[in-house]
Image (cartoon, rainbow, N blue to C red):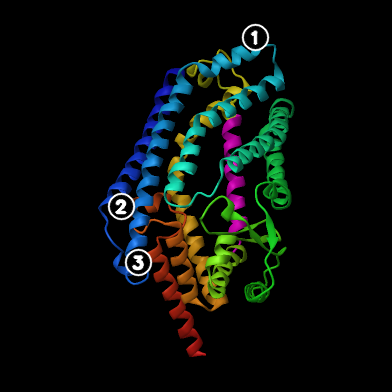
Amino acid sequence: MERWVVPVFLVFFVAQVGIETALLLVNLRHVAGARGVPPALAGAVDAGTAERSRAYTLANGRFGLVEGLLGAAVTPAVLFSGILPWLDAALARAGLEGAHRFVAYLALLAAASSVVWLPLGVWRTFVLEARFGFNRTRPRTWIADRAKSLFLQLAIGIPLLYAVYGFMRFTGRLWWVWLFAFLSAFQLFLAWLYPTVIAPLFNRFAPLPDGPLRERLELLARDAGFRNRGLYVMDASRRSGHSNAYFTGIFRPRIVLFDTLVERMTVDEAASVLAHEIGHYKAHHVHRRLAAGLASSFAALLVLSWLVAWPPLYHAFGFAQPVLHGIVALLALGGGAFVFWLQPLASLLSRRHEYEADRFAVRVARAPQALKAALLRLTGENLSNLHPHPWYSAWHYSHPVLVERLAAIDREASAQGAATAAT
C-alpha cells in the first residue's frame, strides 16, 4: 500500500498545479490581447483607467505565476527531501517529547514558511502595489505590523497548539469530535474578540462623524431592520489606496467603512454599498459561510482521524512511525491538492450571494444608479480586471464580472419598477 501513496499524491498535485497555472496563463493572454474599454462599459469607464486596470491585472497575474511556481517547487521539496522526519529526529535528540515536541515542530515549520514567503510579501507591497499608487505603508509601519502579527501568533497559536495536542492525545477515539467542538467555539470567540481587541492593534476605528452620510446610513439600517453596534471609519489610507467596506462580528456586527470610501463616494453611493452589505447579513450569507467553514473543518478532522494511525502514509514521506505532528504537517502541506477542485463551486456560491445582496440593495436603497456608480467607482479605484477570461473568472472570482453585475442590477431595477407600476 505504501508504494501507492506518493504516486496518488503526485497525480493530484500535478493536476492542481497544471490546472491553476493553465488558467492563469489563459487569463494573462486574454488580458494582454484586450484593448480599450469593454463595449458594455463604454462611457462609464475612461480609456486611461481601462489601460491602468489592464496593466495592474497583468502585473498581479505575473506575480501570482511566480508565487504559484514557487509553491509548486517548495511543497514537493519539503515533502520528499527528508526535512520533515529530520526535524522530528532533531527535536527528539534535543530532548523534546509529547506536547512540547508537537508544538515546537509545527511552530518551526510555520516560521520557516513565513521566512520563505516574506520576500514576496515585501515585493508585492513595496514594488508592485507602489508602482500603481496603492501602497501607502511606510517601512516602519510594515515592520510594526509584522511584529504585532508575530506577537498574536505566539500568544494565540502556541496555547492553541497545546490544546490541539491535548485533544488528539487524551480524549479517546472520538478525539476529533471533541477537537471540532473546541475549535468551533474558539473560532466564534475570535470572531467576537476581533473587532474590539485584535483589529485596533493594526488600525484606528472612529465613529462615523455626524452629517448627511451618517444620517442616511443610520436611516437605511433602521429601515432594513439591521441591528448593529455602530458605524465606524477605519484609517485604511495609512496602508493602501484601495477602498472597501465590511461588517465584523456575527450576531450584531459593526459596520466598518474605509476612510478612502467615505472620502470618494457620494452619500447615495455609500448608502448603496451599505445596503449591499446588509443584504449579505439579512440573507444569512455570513452565517452560511461560517457553517460551510465549520463543515469543512469537520470533514478535515474526520479525514485526519482516519489517517493519524496509518503507517503507510508516514513511511511514504520518510517517517519511521506515526507521530501526531507529522500527520498534521503532511496534511497542511499536501492536503490542498485533494480539495482544490472545490474552488469553482465555492466561487459560484459566492457570486450567487453577491447577486442576492445586489438585489436587496436595489429594493432597500432604491437607488440602482447609485449602486452601479459605486461599483464602477470601486472597480476604477481598485483597478479591477475589466477583461477576465470566462474560465478564470468562473474558477476564481468570488464576485460577478462587472458587466454581468451591472446588467443584473438593471434587470432588478426594471422588475422593481414594473412591480411598483402594477400596484
For residue 31, which numbered disc appears in the image? 2
Q: Regarding mark 3 in the picture, which secondary structure is present there?
A: loop
For residue 141, which numbered disc appears in the image? none
Amino acid type at image mark 3 = Asp
Q: Main secondary structure of the magenta part?
A: helix
Which residue in the rendered view is the most extreme toward the top? 93
Give x and y (percent) for residue 131.
42, 48
Crowdedness of circle 1 by 10 Å Cα count: few (<14), some, many (20+)? Answer: few
User: Mark 3 highlights which residue?
Assistant: 46
Instruction: Say whether disc 3 or disc 2 marks the residue closer to the N-terminus.
Output: 2
Give x and y (percent) for residue 85.
55, 16
> Mark 3 touching mark 2, by CB under 8 A?
no
Amino acid type at image mark 1 = Arg
User: Mark 1 highlights which residue?
Assistant: 93
Q: Which residues fall within the magenta stretch? A: 283-305
- In this view, the residue in front, 302 or 49, is 49
Image position of 292 with respect to 285: above or below: above
Q: Is residue 291 magenta?
A: yes
- In this view, the residue in front, 410 or 380, is 380
